[in-house]
Image (cartoon, rainbow, N blue to C red):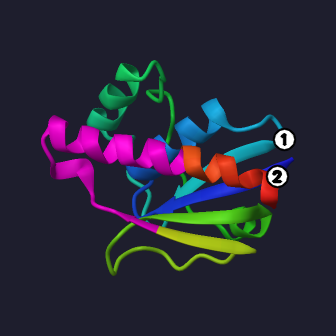
Amino acid sequence: MRYVLFACVENSFRSQIAEAYFKKFAPKEWQAISGGVKPAEKVHPNAILLMKEEGLDISRNKPQPLTQGNQLKAEIAIIVCGSAACPVVYAKRVEEWSMPDPAKMSLDEARRVRDSIKNKVLTLIESLGSI
């Protein structure tokens, strides 16, 4: 099994969305994991709602800590947030997507962030064949 790690601050919105899309669309030999430096108590309700619109249920997900074990396991690490609070992540390949925080946005604005994450995940998946 090969791993992609999606990292954020709270692991409650952006990284949860990215993980869900990756799990849905990635080849079977790839798996997604996610974590945050300060995990929230629960997945953000708007993230759950926005992913239900996509036919993906993340309501049972629980934000996880970003661990050294996850970083060592990951071939690719994606930092999805875009602020000074974002984690420093170590992996063979690290990308920064710098997505704005949708937690305080309207649903329409957050939907645009979700769609951008989906497009980036699909582009990432297309690149996996060259790894």
**Element type at mark 2:** strand
Which is nearer the N-term, disc 1 or disc 2?
2
Is 63 positioned to the left or the right of 68 in the image? Answer: left
Q: Amino acid at mark 1?
A: Glu
Asked if the residue under mark 2 is in contact with the one under mark 1, i.e. CB atoms within 8 Å, the reply is yes
Instruction: Tell me the number on the disc at residue 4.
Output: none
**Residue 12, visible in the rendered structure:** no
Q: Position of residue 76 (x, y in %)?
A: 69, 64
Magenta region includes residue 114: yes
In depth, the one of 123 and 30 nearer the eye is 123
Q: Position of residue 107 (x, y in %)?
A: 17, 36
What residue is at 61 percent from the left and 53 percent from the top? 124
In depth, the one of 55 and 116 nearer the eye is 116
In depth, the one of 69 and 49 nearer the eye is 49
What residue is at 80 percent from the left and 51 percent from the top? 129
Neighbour tally class for label 1: few under 14, some 14-19, many 20 plus, Cα within 10 Å: few
* Residue located beneath label 2 in the image: 2
Is 78 positioned to the left or the right of 92 in the image? Answer: left
Neighbour tally class for label 2: few under 14, some 14-19, many 20 plus, Cα within 10 Å: few
Magenta region includes residue 126: no
What residue is at 64 percent from the left and 33 percent from the top? 25
Q: Amino acid at mark 2?
A: Arg
Q: Residue furthest left?
A: 106
Instruction: Tell me the number on the disc at residue 29.
Output: 1
**Element type at mark 1:** loop
Q: Position of residue 56 (x, y in %)?
A: 48, 23
